[in-house]
Amino acid sequence: MMKRFFFASLLLLLTAVSLPAKGQIVMDRKVRFGIILEGDTIPYYRLKEVKVLESASLLTETEIRKNQKLIRNVKKMLPYAKIGKQRLDVLEKEIADLPKKQRRAAIKAAEKNLLADFSDELKDCTISQGKVLLKLIDRETGRTSYVLVDELRGKLRAGFYQAFARLFGYNLKAAYDPQNNKDDNLIERIVISVEHGRL
């Protein structure tokens, strides 16, 4: 009799422990953070950041048709601006603690490498593509091309490049301002659309 009572108690105990309560779903045995709200336990999960775009930041079909040339130019020049940003970041880390003479040598070597890698491809660019590239470099780095040349090569070189660029219709001092400049805003919207796979 005692054995029967013991086995029955053990069986009852095991079923009570292993079965979830009514309406309760046990998916795993991990410890989760939660918030208790009005008697209910709500699990707390950290999610990856999601960018929510305003519909105004994406291009409409009409704008896409109207700006095919600009879209093509942005799509062609955007990779160069991103590569330029990466190389600038690497260069700035390399030269941060160097003495002035070694710093100049490192900057000249980086410029030489940049010209060797991209001069053939960029020689065939149109004037409008060059203007877009200047805007995209400013967008990526947060500094105008004039400021970059001034910081890396000096005021004299920056002034020379600015004068030479003005002969061909460029302005190295023109800042990228998508909030106040209609053309820059359009470029920004195109870049957002390209980066999110909409173009």
Image: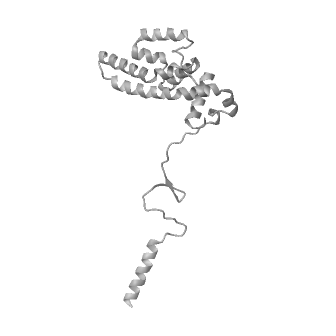
Compared with residue 51, is residue 21 higher up or lower down, i.e. above or below? below
Q: In which quarter of the image is residue 72?
A: top right
Report whether 139 appears left or right of 185. Answer: left
Q: Residue at x 30, y 15 (%)?
A: 101
Name the quarter where the N terminus is drawn.
bottom left
Front residue of this view, candidates 83 and 17? 83
Percent across and percent down for residue 150 are 43, 14
Front residue of this view, candidates 165 and 147? 165
Percent across and percent down for residue 184 are 59, 23
Front residue of this view, candidates 22 and 142? 142
Q: In which quarter of the image is residue 151?
A: top left
Judging from the image, the colouring scheme is one colour
Name the quarter where the C terminus is drawn.
top right
Report whether 18 appears left or right of 194. Answer: left
Residue closest to the far right = 62
Q: Residue at x 57, y 12 (%)?
A: 169
| Count of numbered badges drawn on the protein | 0
Q: Quadrant of residue 109?
A: top left
Q: Residue at x 34, y 16 (%)?
A: 104
Report whether 60 appears left or right of 111. Answer: right
Percent across and percent down for residue 7 are 40, 84
Compared with residue 100, is residue 56 higher up or lower down, i.e. above or below? below
Q: Residue at x 44, y 79 (%)?
A: 12
Percent across and percent down for residue 61 are 69, 34
Residue closest to the far bottom = 1
